[in-house]
Amino acid sequence: MEYIINPELLPPHLELIFNLIRVLFIIISAGLFVAIIYFIFSTDILEEKYLKDVLEFTKASPYKNVKIPKNWESLKEKSRNEDVSERKLAIVEAGDMIVSVLNEMGHEGDSLKECLSEVGTEIIPNKKELIDVYEKGKDVVYNPEKKLSEEEAGEIMEVYEKTLKDLQLL
């Protein structure tokens, strides 16, 4: 107990051992600290978790770096076409466009359902309607016996357009 109060009373060989242990733990701690810093900066985890959201919050319009294809207006025109196959093609292209936009925003998936699986209604308020319309459009497009009326195509395109407006891309 006296050694704690007055460390000079410690025998010199024990003092040397304690100093070596102290230096060893300092070296190990510094190495672990450097490893943590290296892995944080080499994996972009901070950017994904925090910086991306902060940047989106401070921007006037979120997801400015996401590019909406310029052919949206031509897709809307195709959906009003007299030819049923043109309308079906427009619906497929519009659905693919929504999927690619969501993929660019970081919501990965091959289909719209996969992309929207982790997206909340605060990002896309019409999520349920979008999934329903996507399924309806897919059913009409991939079933050759079903006819796609101009009204149905218009409704599907309106939901897609509302989604793009909610994402502030249009």
Image: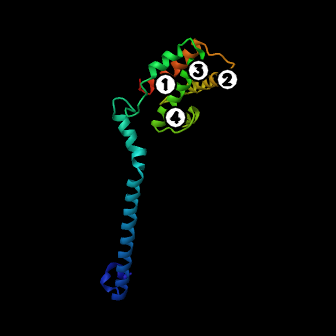
* Residue labelled with disc 2: 143
Identify whether 14 is placed above or below 59. Answer: below
Q: How far apart are marks 4 and 1 (CA)?
A: 13 Å
Residue carrying label 1: 163
Q: State the separation of the CA atoms marked 3 and 2.
A: 10 Å
- Please tell me which of labels 3 and 1 falls first in the chain: 3
Circle 3 or circle 4, nearest the eye: 3
> Disc 2 to disc 4, how far (Cα)?
29 Å
Q: Which amino acid does label 2 sit on?
A: Asn
What kind of residue is marked 1? Thr
Q: In which quarter of the image is residue 154?
A: top right
Q: State left or right for residue 55 relative to residue 160.
A: left
Looking at the image, tell me whether mark 2 or mark 4 is earlier in sequence order.
4
Tell me the SS state at disc 3: helix
Q: In front: 87, or 25?
A: 87
Q: What residue type is labelled 4?
A: Val
Residue behind mark 3: 88
Q: Position of residue 18 (x, y in %)?
A: 37, 80
Secondary element at image label 2? loop
Q: Please tell me how crowded label 4 is: few (under 14), some (14-19), or many (20+) other residues with Cα within 10 Å.
A: some
Kind of residue indicated by mark 3: Lys
- Looking at the rendered image, the disc whose residue lies closer to the viewer, 2 or 4, is 2
Which residue sits at x=60%, y=23%?
A: 137
Where does the image place residue 143, in percent across and percent down from the top left? 67, 23
User: Where 81 sits versus 10, above or below?
Assistant: above
Residue at x 60%, y 13% (from the top left corner): 149
The reply, left or right, for residue 42 in relation to residue 94 is: left
**Residue with the mark numbered 4:** 119
Q: Are marks 3 and 4 in contact (CB under 8 Å)?
A: no
Choose the circle earlier in sequence order: 3 or 2: 3
